[in-house]
Image (spheres, rainbow, N blue to C red):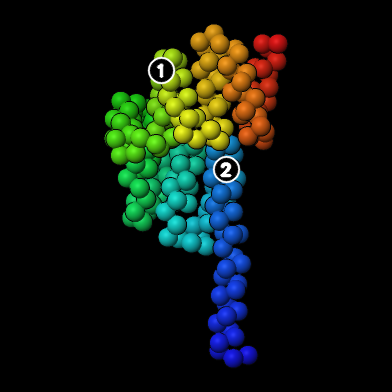
Amino acid sequence: MSSFAISRWILVLAIAAAPVFAQTLETGINLYRTEQYPQAEQELRGVTQNNPENAEARYYLGMTLVELNRLDDAQAEFDKAKEMSVPQDRQKVAEARLQMARQEMDPALASLQEAEALNAENADVYLNRGLIHASRQNFPAAITDLERSLQINPHNPRAHYYAGIAYNRTGRPDKMVEHFQIFLKQAPDSPDAAKVRSMMRSVR
């Protein structure tokens, strides 16, 4: 086989492999958003091993590790994502998630405010701020931020889940059911799915 033919064959293989890689990253992000964190870590680590310079994979791997309460490992991934020039608003959201995990809610709010100033269309800003409001029992404020998050990205089951919880705490079971139904469609395999189904049965 000539060198030209070999080069052409390598190019064909590279093009064929690209969609598989993208799908793997998308799968990892979806596993993170549906709260299947051990599976998300495995998927995203596969992406970073194949492409160590993928800032988005590093970012979501860090976010996954926060949920697994491995904060030092998460910080290491966030640092790598920063070196690879992940957008500054995401850097601030990552900072806020670590602060929230350490129960440093006021600093986390400040980090999210900075993230919002950098990019007011980052849905994770409002999701995480909603979670802080909910942790402080301020459910009306939580609903405002969670609904804003869903306006930007309606395909985030975590936001639907927490919006349902917040509406339940404000005496709006109709809105709880609305968000929980979407949650179950988007994340039927979530660890919270059984709990959600039970809460929905309780209002019938």
Element carrying mark 2:
helix
The answer to which of 73 and 23 lies nearer the viewer is 23
Tell me if 21 is positioned left or right of 184 in this view.
left
181, above or below 66, in the image: above
Residue situated in front as seen by the camera: 153 or 164: 153
Quadrant in which residue 145 is drawn: top left
- Percent from the top left, x then y, of residue 137? 43, 14
| Figure quadrant of the N terminus | bottom right
Q: Amino acid at mark 2?
A: Asn
Label disc, if present, on residue 110 of the rendered structure = none
Q: Is residue 39 above or below residue 84?
A: above
CA distance for labels 1 and 2: 27 Å
Disc 1: CA contacts within 10 A as few (<14), some (14-19) or many (>=20): some
Residue annotated with mark 1: 141
Q: Residue at x 53, y 15 (%)?
A: 167
Cβ atoms under marks 1 and 2 closer than 8 Å: no
| Residue 159 visible (yes or no) | yes
Q: Residue at x 66, y 32 (%)?
A: 185
On the rendered structure, is 28 left or right of 72?
right
- Which residue is tagged 2? 30
Residue type of the residue flagged with mark 1? Ala
Q: Residue at the spot x=56%, y=11% of the render?
A: 172
**119 on left or right of 154:** left
Number of marks drawn: 2
The local secondary structure at tag 1 comes to: helix
Q: Quadrant of residue 130?
A: top left
- Name which of mark 1 and mark 2 comes first in the sequence: 2
Image quarter (top left, top right, bottom left or bottom right) of the C terminus: top right
